[in-house]
Image (cartoon, rainbow, N blue to C red):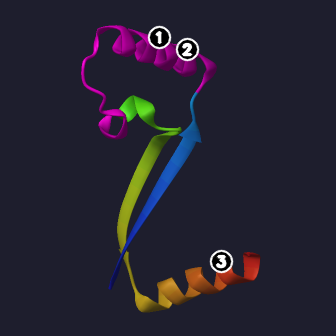
């Protein structure tokens, strides 16, 4: 069996972008420390969902073949 993890991302909406901008401005005003790398609001995209499944070797080979044919 193979453990497969698929992560789906999406872009931020316009509303979320304005909220992030305001949050960043407030953080700059009142923050002493700078932890940009550890903050979730410093990301470029939103994780929309994560799927973790176990698949067989045959299923993996079928997925691999389909991906290689497509790209």
Return the x and y of residue 53 as percentages of the image width and height.
36, 68
Instruction: Please name the residue that numbered disc 1 is placed on.
Output: 22
Q: CA distance from mark 2 to mark 1?
A: 6 Å
Residue at disc 1, secondary structure: helix
Instruction: Measure the alpha-carbon separation of dots 1 and 3.
Output: 40 Å
Question: Is residue 29 found inside the magenta-colored segment of the image?
Answer: yes
Which residue is under mark 2?
A: 18
Q: Which mark is residue 51?
A: none
Q: Position of residue 15 (x, y in %)?
A: 57, 15
The picture quadrant where one finds residue 35 is: top left
Residue lying at the far right in this picture: please name it. 70
Q: Main secondary structure of the magenta part?
A: helix
SS label for mark 3? helix
Quarter of the image that includes the N terminus: bottom left
- Density class for disc 2 (Cα within 10 Å; few <14, some 14-19, many ≥20) is few
Report if the CB atoms under discs 2 and 1 are less than 8 Å apart: yes
> Which residue appears farthest toward the left when viewing the image?
32
User: Residue 26, percent across and down?
Assistant: 38, 9
Which span is picked out in magenta? 13-39
């Amino acid at each position: 069996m193979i453990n497969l993890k698929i992560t789906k991302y999406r872009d931020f909406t316009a509303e979320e972008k304005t909220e992030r901008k305001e949050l960043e401005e407030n953080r700059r005003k009142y923050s002493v420390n700078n932890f940009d790398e550890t903050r979730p609001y410093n990301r470029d995209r939103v994780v929309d969902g994560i799927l973790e499944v176990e698949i067989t070797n045959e299923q993996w080979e079928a997925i691999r073949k389909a991906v290689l044919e497509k790209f």
